[in-house]
């Protein structure tokens, strides 16, 4: 049942942190990115599927876009030109991110093992419920992204059928669109669905893993608030609880460090391309004459914004959580404790002041301010087009 992993927590159906990846892992399986061992039954079928996906998604589409530019560029109308230009930028960015993820996918498995260790510290029912809600939220995010991305694909294909034009301008050496229009559209839609699924995986995974990080950061903060609150415990027990909290924080930091190189590389490519993509989408609005074309472009703009804005928002919240954790530590009941407790607490406060920061390419922080700055490039693209009077020149030609 599709809604099984997005429901509210119940006593007989509590999700773990790794259950946040259920829908995400299904997407990976559909793309053939998680190869089974050769001891598995019919393993070669999955390997064959992986090969088919790689050929059609990462070879056929780039080849088709290059050949379109070579063969059809002179025959492009203004709307065809701006439809064509947007696709290679997004497609090439997706392919580069996919290569990075495929080479570094072992970090996913390592992070999942850390999730299990972090879950082992969740003993109280309240903590388990919080983990469940975080996992359900992550699964809802995957469903929402399916709606946005494949909603765009559906609208683009419907628009192409109405105006009888190729939705993505991908050259097909096997089928001539003029002779077999519906077959060509079907092939193009299926292959582009692969690129869209790859984009969905690449845009969703940082959100899922960091939402889980935030959930355990919040649970750690509550544990710190309860330190030395039970008068029935002696100093040794209080100190043992503090040491466990220090270990929890160390594990959360290690979890973030495991994912950081992967997120840094993929988000660097995405943030650099988002401004150009938004600019091209905004410029294309000036050339589209039909309501359907504008609807497709508007849906595409929403999809582009979804590639960076949600994760930048989550990273902004992580920074706030780190500051909140430091304040919680400082205001906890450590005054009047024995010397070893106070010494450990000071060490803990010092380490907690170092925020869990995700950067794009190790150059600029991933946050809302960075996302806004990159998106401003879209206005630069529009300004350049308007200053050069490119719209009128292309219309006259």
Image: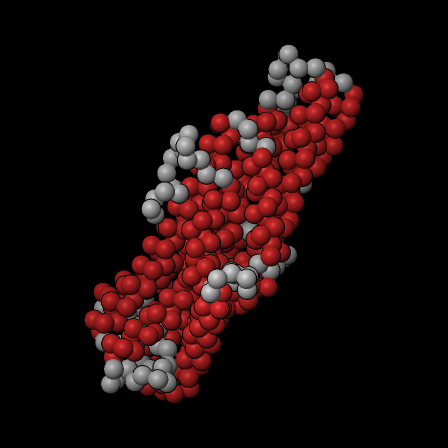
Is 194 positioned to the left or the right of 332 in the image?
left
Q: Position of residue 26 (x, y in %)?
A: 43, 55
Frontmost residue, 244 versus 323: 244
Is 185 positioned to the left or the right of 198 in the image?
left
Q: Position of residue 297 (x, y in %)?
A: 32, 64
Q: Give the residue furthest to the right.
A: 339
In the rendered image of this protein, does residue 37 appear above or below residue 68?
above
Frontmost residue, 210 versus 308: 210
**Residue drawn at (64%, 36%), measured in percent from left and top?**
249
Is 212 positioned to the left or the right of 279 in the image?
right
**Residue drawn at (53%, 47%), measured in percent from left and top?**
209
Q: Give the residue furthest to the left.
A: 162
**Residue drawn at (42%, 46%), measured in percent from left and top?**
139
Q: Is residue 257 visible in this depiction of the protein?
A: yes
Residue 104 occupies which quadrant of the picture? bottom right
In the rendered image of this protein, does residue 202 appear above or below residue 194?
above
Frontmost residue, 181 versus 39: 39
**Residue drawn at (64%, 49%), measured in percent from left and top?**
257
Total number of numbered discs in the rendering: 0
- Way the structure is coloured: secondary structure
Q: Position of residue 392 (x, y in %)?
A: 32, 76
Q: Give the residue furthest to the top.
A: 232
Q: Position of residue 28 (x, y in %)?
A: 46, 59
In the rendered image of this protein, does residue 376 appear above or below residue 176?
above
Q: Is residue 279 visible in this depiction of the protein?
A: no
Quadrant showing the C terminus: bottom left
Frontmost residue, 396 versus 224: 224
């Amino acid at each position: 049942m599709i809604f099984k992993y997005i429901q509210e927590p119940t006593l007989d159906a509590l999700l773990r942190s790794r259950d946040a990846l259920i829908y995400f892992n299904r997407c990976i399986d559909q793309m053939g990115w998680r190869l089974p061992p050769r001891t598995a039954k019919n393993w070669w079928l999955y390997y064959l599927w992986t090969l088919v996906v790689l050929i059609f998604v990462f070879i056929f589409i780039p080849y088709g876009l290059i050949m379109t530019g070579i063969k059809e560029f002179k025959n492009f109308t203004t709307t065809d030109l701006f439809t064509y230009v947007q696709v290679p930028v997004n497609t090439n960015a997706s392919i580069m991110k996919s290569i990075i993820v495929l080479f570094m996918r072992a970090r996913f498995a390592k992070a999942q093992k850390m999730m299990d260790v972090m879950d082992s510290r969740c003993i109280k029912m309240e903590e388990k419920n919080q983990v469940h809600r975080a996992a359900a939220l992550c699964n809802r995010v995957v469903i929402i992204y399916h709606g946005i991305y494949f909603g765009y694909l559906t609208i683009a294909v419907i628009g192409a059928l109405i105006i009888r034009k190729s939705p993505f301008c991908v050259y097909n050496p096997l089928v001539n669109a003029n002779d077999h229009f519906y077959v060509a559209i079907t092939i193009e839609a299926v292959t582009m669905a692969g690129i869209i699924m790859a984009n969905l995986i690449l845009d969703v995974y940082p959100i899922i893993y960091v939402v889980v990080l935030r959930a355990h950061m919040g649970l750690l903060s509550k544990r710190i608030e309860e330190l030395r609150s039970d008068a029935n415990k002696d100093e040794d027990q209080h100190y043992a609880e503090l040491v466990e909290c220090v270990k929890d924080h160390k594990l959360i930091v290690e979890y973030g460090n495991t994912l950081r190189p992967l997120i840094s590389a993929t988000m660097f490519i995405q943030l650099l391309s988002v401004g150009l993509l938004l600019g091209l989408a905004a410029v294309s609005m000036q050339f589209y004459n039909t309501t359907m074309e504008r609807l497709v472009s508007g849906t595409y703009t929403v999809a582009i914004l979804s590639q960076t804005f949600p994760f930048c928002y989550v990273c902004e919240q992580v920074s706030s959580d780190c500051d909140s954790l430091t304040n919680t530590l400082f205001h906890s009941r450590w005054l009047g404790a024995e010397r070893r407790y106070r010494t450990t607490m000071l060490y803990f406060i010092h380490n907690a002041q170092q925020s869990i920061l995700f950067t794009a390419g190790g150059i600029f922080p991933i946050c809302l301010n960075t996302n806004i700055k990159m998106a401003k490039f879209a206005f630069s693209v529009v300004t350049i087009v308007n200053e050069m009077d490119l719209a009128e020149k292309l219309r006259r030609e």
